[in-house]
Image: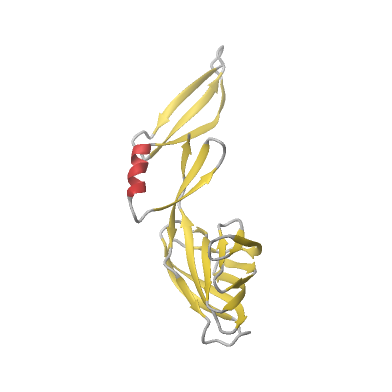
Amino acid sequence: MTFCSYAVFPNRTEFVNFFSLRHDRDNELLSNAIQVFYVELSKLKELLKKPETEWHLEKEGEHLFRLYPIAITKPLVCDLLEMQPGQPGGSDWTLRNPMEKQNFAFRMKVNGYGYIQDPRFYCKYGMLQFRAVVKGGQYLLFDGKEAYVTDRNYNRLAQVDYSGSCQIDQGDTQLSFGCSFGGDEGPEVQVRIITKAKPYLIRR
């Protein structure tokens, strides 16, 4: 059997080699399902030098990694200080998502002496709710798959259950936030929304 390789789009920042499996006797195509993506490292290095570009690296296997360009918003603030404990609190935010429409990840920080409970995000595409209590000085981190409460040093304190889903549009978009809260005074909640583009696949 013979492997045949075909280079496609060699002048782009990423390019594809297709490997097809053919029989030696009659040249019958047995499989063209194997596709390998390569990154031109010289061009990737230039992207990595840009200070405005953020990246997230995920390990896919022993020799394969996914490198995602990501966008992180400025802190979106919900100040609960003027509200009475026990009241539902919340904010309506406008943010800009430079990536395509998608589900999002986030980093949430709670400041002050109070706590929030069961935070939720919602828009026209649905609602995403977390069953958690987050105290002042703690974080709620969500990577799109798992959610954790951490201390100020990002040490994990508890895994958090969640339900639902919520997407945000590309470009300027609306997102609402809500929660219950308590404690000596209403805390301040800061949220940074994280979206990502299609990854570069890197083999070592």
Residue at image location 57% in from the left, 38% down from the top: 61
Q: Which colour scheme is used?
A: secondary structure
Q: Say if 68 sits above or below 79 in the image.
A: above
Which of 30 and 162 lies nearest the eye of the viewer?
162
Q: Where is residue 99 in the image (x, y as percent from the top left)?
A: 43, 56
Q: Say if 6 sits above or below 132 in the image.
A: above
User: Which quadrant of the figure has residue 183?
Assistant: bottom right
Residue at image location 48% in from the left, 60% down from the top: 194
Residue reaching furthest top? Answer: 25
Q: Where is residue 28 in the image (x, y as percent from the top left)?
A: 56, 19
Which of 204 and 156 lies nearest the eye of the viewer?
156
User: Which quadrant of the figure has residue 158?
Assistant: bottom right
- If the image is split into quadrants, where does the N terminus sit? top right
Left or right, residue 95 beside residue 149: left
Q: Position of residue 56 (x, y in %)?
A: 47, 51
Residue at image location 55% in from the left, 61% down from the top: 154
Q: Position of residue 63 (x, y in %)?
A: 53, 35
Q: Say if 82 sits above or below 110 in the image.
A: below
Numbered circles on residues, count: 0
